[in-house]
Image: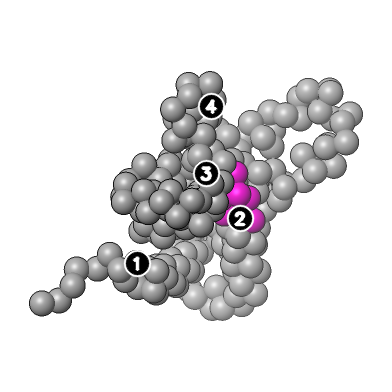
Amino acid sequence: MIFDYTVIWDNLPLYLGGVLVTLKLLAIALFFGLLAAVPLALMRTSRSPWVNGPAWLYTYVIRGTPMLVQLFLVYYGLAQFEAVRESVLWPYLSNATFCACLAFAINTSAYSAEILAGSLKATPHGEIEAAKSMGMSRAKLYRRILLPSAMRRALPQYSNEVIMMLHTTSLASIVTLIDITGAARTVSSQYYLPFEAFITAGLFYLCLTFILVRLFKLAERRWLAYLAPRRS
């Protein structure tokens, strides 16, 4: 078997453009997903069923359905409603990039909310008592103690979510976006070299995963050093 990688080299700009699209989708989805995850996590830790219930239902539905189905519902499904097509949101909802970012953000918000909620529930009671003894209000307690502490402890689990979301962005090629996978599909269809095209895409994802893992390891080493076992 002879592999022809000259075609890959000639199409390297297409792959590099796909990397930029992938990183753009990932960054936007993670930013807005985490923005939505914080209030959802706070709702999930509430003792009131009227507050906890809607957040639980949201995370249950989103985590219980495939990402591909969610993407199709946003990109293809909403377009069938005339009210949507005539609304001011249609210029955005008819845009593939916006729909992909929206679907990815919704998906990661549910998983991130459960990760943060678990970290909030695992907060040592001593930290809460110490904050209360200093006269902190409930809002200040969450802002200065609970949320920063929970986010630090959630880093190992959240890093897995970020990597999974990186891989999930490969679905964007299905809605016409030329990300890394979209570049591979283009090369494969034009030159009939699926192995070379997709193994190159896999290598790009592998490199990006390695970089993300290293960045999170550095973050954990800095912000979770106090949790490391002390050497005798």
Q: Residue furthest left?
A: 232
Q: Residue at x 62, y 34 (%)?
A: 72
Residue 138 disc label: 3
99 lies left or right of 81: left
Q: Residue at x 80, y 43 (%)?
A: 92
Residue 187 percent location from the top left of the image = 59, 63
Mark in the foreground, 1 or 2: 1
Mark in the foreground, 4 or 3: 3
Q: Residue at x 63, y 31 (%)?
A: 73
What secondary structure is marked by label 4?
helix
Q: Amino acid at mark 3?
A: Arg
Please state which of residues 135 and 98 is positioned toward the viewer in this rendering. 135
Of marks 1 and 4, which one's residue comes earlier in the chain?
A: 4
Q: Residues within 10 Å of mark 4 (few under 14, many from 20)?
A: some
Q: Which residue is mark 1?
A: 224
Q: Which residue is mark 2?
A: 31
Of marks 2 and 4, which one's residue comes earlier in the chain?
A: 2
Of marks 1 and 2, which one's residue comes earlier in the chain?
A: 2
Give the CA distance from mark 4 to mark 3. 17 Å
Of marks 4 and 3, which one's residue comes earlier in the chain?
A: 4
Please state which of residues 110 and 96 is positioned toward the viewer in this rendering. 110
Q: Main secondary structure of the magenta part?
A: helix
Q: Amino acid at mark 2?
A: Phe
Of marks 1 and 3, which one's residue comes earlier in the chain?
A: 3
Q: Amino acid at mark 4?
A: Val
Q: Is residue 38 magenta?
A: no
Give the CA distance from mark 1 to mark 4. 31 Å
The magenta segment is 28-36
Q: Residues within 10 Å of mark 3 (few under 14, many from 20)?
A: few
Q: Amino acid at mark 1?
A: Leu
Q: Which residue is mark 4?
A: 51
